[in-house]
Image: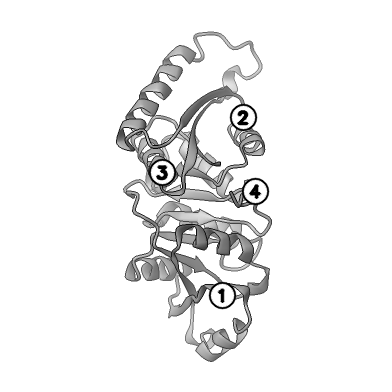
């Protein structure tokens, strides 16, 4: 049975992402785990935890309320579990992934101008950069739609090192169409024939993808504009150490995309069942 993990902090955007996760779980026949992490404030980290620091009973009640709301929204078609854990946010998400082996971690993000909660600000970026399982980032205003069109954003560098098996597995799971987007800052580096030749024997060609190239000085904006133009339901990026999709640049995609985004690393673990 597949599993989806949805970290929550009970904000409006977090609840929207958890609804997205629940509807996605229905689509792929997965269980959903709602995860809340009680992270110690630095000021009390060196002292014993008391009831004045966390209202654990109140948090458990909020989790159950959210669970009930989500079950009603999906007509009780999935199983939902809740977890409320004390510890470091990044560490606890990684540890839960080890035991649950999720299909994905689904998490919300605020726009960069309203990073008023540490959880959805730093945690979303950390998860997209470091987790070994796919991370789906849900924009604050995104609503779940059946995933029919998936796009892979690529800089065409190390194109044969992309996690083709994982991407193929995801595309086939949704029985979706695959688009491949490439944005370049100037026309000198855009050569459609070169693109076609480079990808001539790529494994992803078994999915019959369509290729699109665009010139834009802002790589991220070029890709997101293509995503809107072609009505993409899920945009896949592969964070890298260098190049247009290096990890710090990937943060811009996380904060500014209007399309649900999946971050996959070259060594990600994508359960096949």
The residue positioned 39% from the left and 62% from the top of the image is 148
Nearest to N terminus: mark 2 or mark 3: 3
- Picture disc at residue 206: 1
Q: CA distance from mark 1 to mark 3?
A: 27 Å
Element assignment for label 3: helix
Q: CA distance from mark 4 to mark 3?
A: 23 Å
Quadrant for the N terminus in the image: top right
Eyeballing the image, is 170 above or below 75?
Answer: below
Q: Between tags 1 and 2, which lies in front?
A: 1
Q: Which residue is mark 2?
A: 88
Callout 3: few (<14), some (14-19), or many (20+) C-alpha neighbours within 10 Å?
some
Callout 4: few (<14), some (14-19), or many (20+) C-alpha neighbours within 10 Å?
many
Nearest to N terminus: mark 4 or mark 3: 3
Q: Between tags 1 and 4, which lies in front?
A: 1
Callout 1: few (<14), some (14-19), or many (20+) C-alpha neighbours within 10 Å?
few
Q: Nearer the viewer, residue 39 or 69?
A: 69
Q: CA distance from mark 4 to mark 2?
A: 17 Å
Splitting the image into 4 quarters, where does residue 224 fall?
bottom left
Element assignment for label 1: helix
């Amino acid at each position: 049975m597949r599993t989806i993990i949805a970290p929550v902090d009970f904000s409006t955007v977090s609840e929207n992402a958890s609804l997205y996760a629940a509807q996605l779980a229905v689509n792929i026949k997965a269980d959903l785990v709602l995860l809340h992490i009680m992270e110690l404030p630095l000021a009390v980290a060196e002292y014993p935890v008391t009831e004045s620091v966390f209202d654990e009973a109140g948090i458990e009640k909020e989790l159950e309320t959210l669970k009930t709301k989500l079950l009603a929204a999906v007509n009780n078609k999935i199983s939902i579990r809740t977890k409320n854990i004390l510890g470091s946010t990044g560490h606890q998400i990684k540890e839960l992934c080890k035991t649950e082996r999720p299909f994905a971690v689904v998490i919300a993000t605020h726009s960069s101008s309203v990073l008023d909660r540490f959880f959805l600000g730093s945690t979303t970026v950390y998860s997209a950069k470091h987790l070994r399982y796919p991370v789906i980032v849900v924009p604050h205003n995104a609503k779940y739609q059946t995933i029919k069109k998936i796009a892979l954003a690529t800089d065409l560098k190390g194109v044969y090192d992309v996690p083709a098996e994982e991407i193929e597995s995801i595309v086939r799971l949704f029985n979706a169409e695959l688009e491949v987007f490439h944005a370049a800052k100037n026309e000198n580096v855009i050569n459609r024939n070169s693109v076609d030749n480079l990808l001539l024997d790529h494994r992803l060609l078994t999915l019959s993808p369509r290729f699109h190239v665009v010139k834009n000085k802002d790589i991220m904006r070029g890709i997101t504009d293509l995503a809107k133009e072609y009505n993409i339901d899920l945009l896949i990026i592969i964070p890298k150490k260098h190049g247009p999709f290096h990890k710090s640049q990937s943060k811009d995609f996380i904060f500014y995309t209007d399309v649900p985004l999946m971050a996959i690393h070259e060594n990600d673990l994508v359960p096949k069942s």
